[in-house]
Image: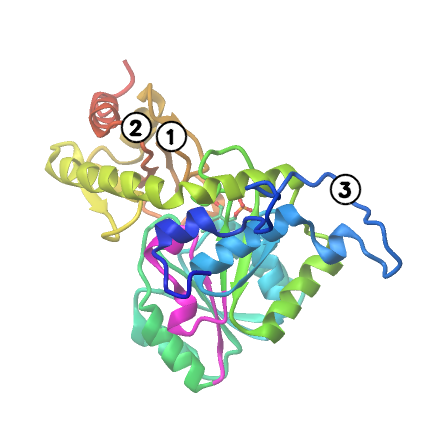
Amino acid sequence: MLGRRLHQATVAVSTGRPRGVGEPLNHPIVLASNIRGEAGEYSRTHGTATWLGLEEAVGALEGGRAISFSSGMAAASGALFALSPKVLVLPTDSYLGVRALVADHVQQGHLRTRAVDIADTDAVVAALDGADVVWIETPTNPTLDVADVPRICAAATAQGVRVVVDSTFATPIYAQPLSDGATIVIHSGTKFIGGHSDLLIGLAVTTDDAMYDRLHQARLVNGSTPGALEAFLALRGVRTLPLRMERAQANAMKLVTRLRAHEAVATVRYPGFGAMVAFELKGGAAAADAACRAVKLIVPATSLGGVETTMERRQKYAGDAHVPPGLIRISVGIEHIDDIWDDLADAFGGTP
Ligand SMILES: Cc1ncc(COP(=O)(O)O)c(C=O)c1O
């Protein structure tokens, strides 16, 4: 736009806007399925200004072209549809919904999987031989394993293996995997991008024009289109994404220091960036459940990435049976850190 590379904070604020003189600063919430015309114009086919604004902004933040979907799961399904792998390398620890999606494909006989520890780069690289796609999630949900994206992408590219990166936890503020050679980056925009726990949306981003067409086709034929209000709110969320991440990450870092020093805490996992933290209490699953019941400010809830701090014990879900029983995943919000900490430390005493 200005002929020089802008910082992410500026990109988040300035992209995805109408540019003409006399136009409003924000794209409107376009509530129309139908478009006047003779060439079959239709919102599912052609998109709307509301979607296009969000896609332009997220595309600019990731360094590619984005397609918006009705949810993160729809974006994941769209990426699988676009790539149609026969052999898929998948992290053992990754979002349980994505693993359920892949398991369904396996059950239908559409593909085979190779499960890997995504933090074990040698194992991931070894699994690439004869694979079509490697699915990276980093940091993973919920154990926060971190993948070496540049090394995996280099090895995958050399063997013609395509790479999907679920970058929901990293956000475009802390990672831009397309610049490392990833084929498609996906987001549950429901989380940090939206940032206010008030919508479901997904995004898939690519630098490859043919892949963009495949993703567009995936949304078109599956009908996994975003809602108008959701797209508007998600773009509004993008405006403050860098600011929210800065605060949430600063809070997360302080929280990690305090957790590590607390006598009730057994282990703490933190990737070193972002707003997601996982920890175990010495009292195991029972103590974790008691803490989740006892918090008063922090919200016991399964979703994450909002301005409010949420926490949950993950192993209770069938799909997360591999997770340590007492592991609590906490999505650190933008409240004052002392209030978050006081609430958590009080909760370690158990149910009052
Ligand atoms: C890493 C990750 N990817 C994808 C999804 C799915 O997103 P959605 O709930 O928007 O469908 C989630 C949801 O928790 C997630 O955590």
Judged left or right of residue 188, residue 177 is left
Q: In the rendering, at what x and y percent does residue 344 appear?
A: 25, 26
- Residue 240 in view of the camera: yes
> Which mark's residue is nearer the viewer, 3 or 1?
3
Secondary element at tag 2: loop
* Contact flag, marks 3 and 1 (Cβ < 8 Å): no
| Residue 335 circle label | 2
| Residue displayed at 50% across by 65% down | 64
Q: Can you say whether 133 is above or below 286 in the image?
A: below
How many C-alpha atoms fall within 10 Å of the one at disc 2: few (<14), some, or many (≥20)? some
Task: Identify which residue, 179 or 57, lies in the foreground.
Answer: 57
Judged left or right of residue 274, residue 226 is right
Task: Identify which residue, 189 or 11, lies in the foreground.
Answer: 11
In the image as oriented, which residue stretches furthest toward the right?
38
Q: Is mark 2 within 8 Å of ligand 1?
A: no
First of labels 3, 1 by sequence position:
3
Please give the range of residues in magenta: 160-184
Circle 1 residue: 308
* Contact flag, marks 1 and 2 (Cβ < 8 Å): yes
